[in-house]
Image: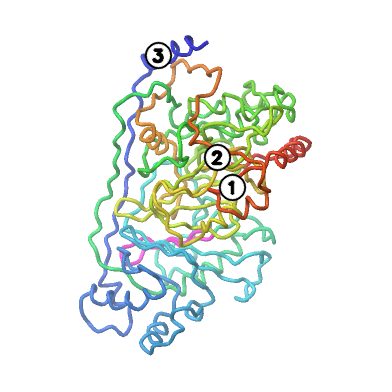
Amino acid sequence: MRSSIFASLALLLATAATAGEIEAPRVTLSHVDWASAASTVSGQSSGKADALFARLNAQTGTRFAGIGKSAVPVLLPIDIDAFRKDFVAGHSDVYTSRKYFGGFYPSKFFLAGPAGYTATFFIDTADAGLNFEYRKRPIEVEITGAAFTYDLDGPDHQEESTPKALEDLFPGIRRILRDAHVRYAFERFGVPYVVSIQCYDRPPSDRYVSCREADPVAERFLRALHTAGGTPAQIQQPKIDLTQPSTISGSFTYYGPGDLIPNTGWNKLPGREDRHIYARIRFPIADAPAYVKSQSFMPWGDCYRGGHVGSMGKKGSVYRCKVNDIPLVFDESATANFTYPWRDNFCELRDFVVGQCPGGHGHQGEDIRPANCVLGDKDSDRCLPYQHAVAAVRDGLIWRRAGNLGLWVVVNTPNDLVRFRYLHMNPKMMDADGMLSGRKVSEGEIIGRVGTWGDYPRGTSYHIHFNIQVFTKAGWAWVSPYMSLVVAYERLIGARGVEITAGDPPPPVPDKPPIILPSATVTVESSASTDSREKTAAAHIKVKRKHHHRILKRHRRVRHRLAHRG
C-alpha cells in the first residue's frame, strides 16, 4: 500500500499542470479633502488642517484612544461641541459619560490606523424608546471610514436602494442589503464610509434583529455623526508579499480554488475560482499538519439538508449524500478527514448570504481540521474537543462580545484593512481567557483551542471555521480565504504545495494518518470536570474521559437531529 501511494504521488508531482498564479487584491485609494473636514469642526480658528486636527485629537483621544492614527477624518455619533466644551472646562464626564452620544454608547472596540478606522457603538432598544420585538441584547452599530477600498471581481450579489430621508444630508447615500447586514454607504471628504448593522431581512421577531427594525437605528446614528479626529497623512499604495517557498512539498496537495466536492454548491452551482491573496497571514492552526476539509460532505457529515441514503448514528455505518452519491462512513476519525488533499468549501451549500458566491449563498469561509482526531474510546464516532491550539493570524485587535461564538481579529496597517473570524471554539473558554473587544493580540499568539461548539456544546464536528472580510465601498464583504490559507500553510511547513488541476489523477487516501509530534496535542487527563474546564484559561484545559463518554452515548441517540453548522 505504501509503495503505491508514493508512486501515485510521484505521478501527480510529475504531471500536475502549472497552477494558476496567485494575485494581490486591487484597491482604490481615497483622496482626502482635509480642508473640507476641518471646516466642519466648529470654533476652530483658521489655520492648517493638521494643526486643527492635532488639537481635536488631544481632546477626543481621551475617550477614543489612538484616534489621531486614522489616515481619514473620523466620523462618530458624538455631540462634539458639548464634549469639547466640557473637556476645556475640566469636567470628568468626558471620560465616562454616555450623554454625548445621542442614545448610543461606545463599545470597547475602536481601531484607528493608516488604513482608516473602525468603531462600534451600542444602543439599548428599551432605553432609547425603540419599539422593537427584539430586546435580548443591545444593538451594535459599526462604522468604518477607509483610506482605501478593495475592488472585488463579480459575482457580487447585493440589494441596493436610495434612502430618500437621508439624501439631503448624505448626497449619493445607498442602502445596501448584503451578507446579513443592512449598510448605509456614503462618501464625505473624498472618503468612503459605511454604517452597518447585522440583521435579517425578515419580519420582526424576538429572536433576531430584523433589517426593518435596524433602519431607524442606522438613520439615528447617521444623523448624529460629527468629525471627531484623524491626522492628514499620505496614503500609500498597499503591498502584499506573495513570496512562496521554492521547495516543493512531497505530501501537501490541494484542489484548486472553487473546486468543490461535486454538486455541493448552492443549487449545485460551482465554487468561485478566486486566486487573490487578501492578506499575508500566519496559518490559524498552531501546528501542522492541518486540513481544509468540508464538515458536511465528508465522513460523519450531515449532508447539510441535502438528505442522505443509508444509516447514520452508528460508528462505521456506510451512507451517501443524495447530492453526489459519494460513499461515506459514519466516523469522524476516518482517515479521509485527516489527510491531504485540501478542498475549497467557501461556496459550499449553506443558507448564509455570500455576495461573492455564484448563487449568492454559501459557506462564508473555510472549515479547517487540525492534525488528528483523539477519541474518548474505541467505540466513539467523534473527536474529543480542545486537543489542538488555535493561533492569531496577525497582530490585531479583538472584536467580540462576551458569550459570542465568533471571534474577530481586526487588522489596520498601511497594507491591510481586513479582518478574520474564527468559529466553533468554546465561548466560555474565550470569555475566561479575556478574548473580548479591545484586547490586542500578536501574530502566532494562542487564542483558543479547536472545539466542537455550534449553537450549543458538541453541536458541530471538530474543526474551526475561518473567514476573511475586506472593506469595500459597500462595506465589509466575505472573500474566499482559500488561497491565503494555502500560502500561509506553505510558509508554516516550509514547502510549496502541489495543486490538483483538471485531469490530474487524485492522490489516493493513505491507509493511516501522518505521525503527529507530541507538541500538537494536549494531554488528556481524567481529573478535571467540564465546569472547571470552561472556567479556566484554554491553555490549561484538560478533558475528562468519563464525562465525554456519557456525552457520546447521549449524542448517538439524537444524531439524526444534529445540524453540523459551519
Q: Amino acid at mark 2?
A: Val
Task: Say which element carries label 1.
Answer: loop
Q: Earlier in the sequence, mark 3 or mark 2?
A: 3
* Identity of the residue drawn at 55% across and 35% down: 348
Give the residue at mark 2.
Answer: 522
Task: Say which element carries label 3.
Answer: helix
Q: Which residues are magenta?
A: 182-197
Main secondary structure along the magenta-highlighted residues: strand
Measuring from the top left, give residue 277's x and y in whole percent: 36, 40
Give the residue at mark 3.
Answer: 10
Task: Say which element carries label 2.
Answer: loop
Give the residue at mark 1.
Answer: 541
Asked whether 195 falls inside the magenta stretch, the response is yes
Measuring from the top left, give residue 156's x and y in whole percent: 46, 45
Q: Are marks 1 and 2 in contact (CB under 8 Å)?
A: yes
- Label 1, label 3: how far apart the Cα atoms are: 42 Å
Q: Amino acid at mark 3?
A: Ala
Q: Earlier in the sequence, mark 1 or mark 3?
A: 3
- Label 1, label 2: how far apart the Cα atoms are: 8 Å
Residue 459 drawn above or below residue 514: below
Asked whether 207 falls inside the magenta stretch, the response is no
